[in-house]
Image: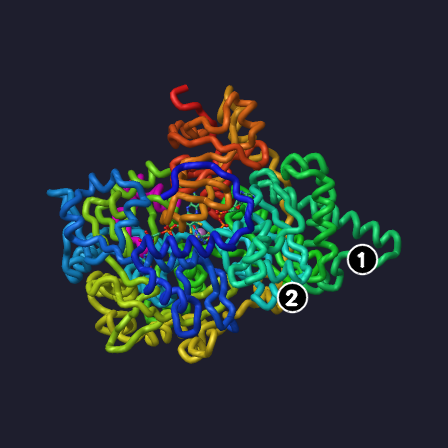
Amino acid sequence: MSAPKIAPYDRPAGGWGALKNVAIQLVAQGIPLKGARTLLSANQRSGFDCPGCAWPDREHASTFEFCENGAKAVAAEATKRRVTPAFFAAHSVTELLDCDDYTLEGYGRLTHPLRYDAATDHYVPIAWDDAFAMIGRHLRALPDPDQAAFYTSGRTSNEAAFLYQLFVRHYGTNNFPDCSNMCHEPTSVGLPPVVGLGKGTVTLEDFEQADTLLLFGQNPGTNHPRMLGELREAARRGATIVSINLLHERGLERFADPQSPAEMLSLGGTSISGHYVTPASGGDFAFVKGMIKHILERDAQARADSLPALLDDAFIAEHTRGFETFAADVRAERWDDLERAAGVSQAQMRRIADVYLRGERVIATWGMGITQHKHAVETIQMIVNLMLLRGNIGRPGAGLCPVRGHSNVQGDRTVGINEKPSAAFLERLGKAFDFDPPRRPGLGVVDTIAAMLEGRIKVFIGMGGNFAMATPDTPRAWEGLRRCDLSVHVATKLNRSHLVHGRDALILPCLGRTEIDMQGGAVQGVTVEDSMSMVHLSYGINAPASEHLRSEPAIVAGMAQATLGRGPAGRDDWHWFVEDYDRIRDGIAATFEDFADFNRRVRRPGGFRLDVPPSQRRWLTPNGRANFTTHALPRELPIDVARRHAGARGADVLQLATIRSHDQYNTTIYGLNDRYRGVFGQRRVVFANPEDLDARGLRAGERIDLVGVWDDGVERRAEDFLLVAYDIPRGSVAAYYPETNGLVPLDATADGAGTPTSKSVPVLLERRGG
Ligand SMILES: Nc1nc2c(c(=O)[nH]1)N[C@H]1C(S)=C(S)[C@@H](COP(=O)(O)OP(=O)(O)OC[C@H]3O[C@@H](n4cnc5c(=O)[nH]c(N)nc54)[C@H](O)[C@@H]3O)O[C@H]1N2
Ligand SMILES: Nc1nc2c(c(=O)[nH]1)N[C@H]1C(S)=C(S)[C@@H](COP(=O)(O)OP(=O)(O)OC[C@H]3O[C@@H](n4cnc5c(=O)[nH]c(N)nc54)[C@H](O)[C@@H]3O)O[C@H]1N2
Ligand SMILES: [Mo]
């Protein structure tokens, strides 16, 4: 491990550094050969879908698609290390709580089902049937099924997720908190009313045809490395790429494809973004509105001069509603208000708007830099407004591209992991399985924690993920979990959530996606849906990490059988579904029109694409049109609200963006470097603008505490961070998640979506001991 240092990185993203780091990671997991073989089958036709990110893979790719961080995700799962009952006998839970998260996951794969023994404070082995019986006992004892919550993290396959929701809805609740509540929920909430579907509209072919790409608030060099391949191609054929990001991310600037000998030898790489905008935190909303104001002005001028109009009048007339009201609102906006809210000059807003106007085929992408803000839904809808102006949705080379996180987070939602299910879905599910699903809306992540704290949730079951670390307001989340009667985690590796447990607790070890899943004497495949609505089969190729592991669907069936005593639709047993996953897929097909003939279609090479009506200009909105939406600039910016709360120290408040380093996968820490940002051997760093430091009498290299500012009287503090001078807009600082989650107030959420506003957390910097 490298010694802690800060050393700016001047190479392109990718390149030799990426190759070297894959090798390091494989050796660290003790798997040079096997790891390499495993990697070769990621995202190939007969192999597994990479458990890294949700970026689609190219059907026609014949060689391994190189991706450093995909390799890390695969290596982490294929590790040689094991965390066995002997390990748990040697370490009490209290002892393990002292380990950092990096160490916990580093112990390797879980091998046996485990039960918490309060008498000794150790996890001890338990037989699978006894574990299921314990779950059944607890669930049946609850006076109201709404006192249990069933979390899902987005690696779970369609088959496991569908069976899970079927079990939980038979049990009687819609309490499905889901990692997407903390992630792309504002996309799922914001898009349906305006385009009729909460998903992206583009495919990889559209990326090949686009001439202009607007990339909002995402860091593909780290989080979606395979996307860099698309961006590189686009840049090389002359497409204009605009990055709108709080930070100058290296992957958005320059990329060297490790498969290109020329780029590798020259050390040069391809320049990615022709334009780079760094708005204030959350300033994207006003920035896009400013772009639109310029477009409306230029369009009016063009018409006055009898030049061709700049708006797509025919598209607007035929396909949309709400244009006049929306346009009047934008025209009335004042440039100085827009500039202040965006943190971008009028001139730059106009310049980027002209880039947009020159584009014939424009794609807009976005990630967590857009969704984890108070005005996320409005911002996404403003991006849609921008795209509608020139008919940039539903034709080749143009459209919307929310870039999802977990490899199957989109699919889990599609197949029913939804705390606010539509009546139509429940209707079909009820018909397909001959039961009456619960209609009451359930709880998302933030509401689940609040309910735990109030004693309204007593049983927590987690299908993957790391609820204790991924959620906001860490001490409160932990208190909530500890108040539960039972906590259960289906997991591949040990994590903090297993140690912050209910009175009774279980850890149920499962197969990972890279492993062979044998059921009923045959190898089973599972399906996943990527960011572009492509559904395909995934088959593991490695031997399971332990003979005691069960697949996620098998674990769901075990819980369901022990809780409900009988299967759905008149069957005696839930295990029937697990003997052949085709049966689960038939159930999915019976529930969703989109999945008709699922088993046959998914076996075609490359799988199939789900229906994406807006990509064909079919708008499944209440009025049957795409809708322009009118959103005023907030009267008070979130930072002003925070300053008001901070009273005398108001002027010192900064907005903290909690982001991912290059060596982590969400709460899983692979290593302590963030190479592209020049951070090595450490994670407790805060990136700050040098002028902001000067103004506060602080210096780079000093150690500080981050102190939360909120209006609820709760003290929030994250201790001992190194100040790093960084090219970041004034008023903003950035630090890694999850170390900073304790600073995110539970009720600081995106309007209308409930997503924690993890990218604009109001904080003060306090010199240690000062
Ligand atoms: N290797 C790896 N891959 C991953 C993950 C991982 O942790 N590691 N996580 C997966 C998951 S679940 C997800 S959701 C995705 C996340 O992928 P991203 O969406 O890229 O996630 P973040 O690292 O949170 O980075 C958000 C970006 O937004 C920028 N930003 C912050 N605030 C603002 C703002 O106000 N405006 C703008 N324009 N930009 C802003 C930050 O500088 C940063 O570049 O990646 C997925 N893939
Ligand atoms: N402050 C702040 N907080 C955030 C974010 C942020 O940007 N800032 N991002 C948010 C986002 S976008 C997301 S998606 C969430 C992520 O929240 P989660 O999805 O809950 O967290 P992960 O870290 O992805 O979960 C990792 C754990 O999943 C388990 N696991 C891995 N593979 C498998 C598998 O195949 N099956 C099962 N059953 N378990 C498996 C392992 O035990 C591992 O420890 O965090 C959110 N929290
Ligand atoms: Mo995510």
Q: Tell me if label 1 and label 2 are in contact, CB under 8 Å.
A: no
Apparent side of residue 448 relative to residue 299 in the rendered image (left or right): left
Taking the spot 33% from the left edge, 41% from the top edge, the residue there is 477
The answer to whether residue 448 is magenta is yes
Q: Quadrant of the N terminus?
A: top left
SS state under label 2: helix
Locate residue 92, reporting x and y percent. 17, 42
Locate residue 390, reporting x and y percent. 71, 58
Q: Quadrant of the C terminus?
A: top left
Numbered badge on residue 309? 1
Taking the spot 61% from the left edge, 44% from the top edge, the residue there is 285
Numbered badge on residue 646? none
Tell me where the magenta segment starts and ends, as one range.
Answer: 446-464
- The image quadrant of residue 393 is bottom right
Q: Residue furthest right?
A: 305
Q: Which residue is mark 2?
A: 209
SS state under label 1: loop
- The image quadrant of residue 207 is bottom right
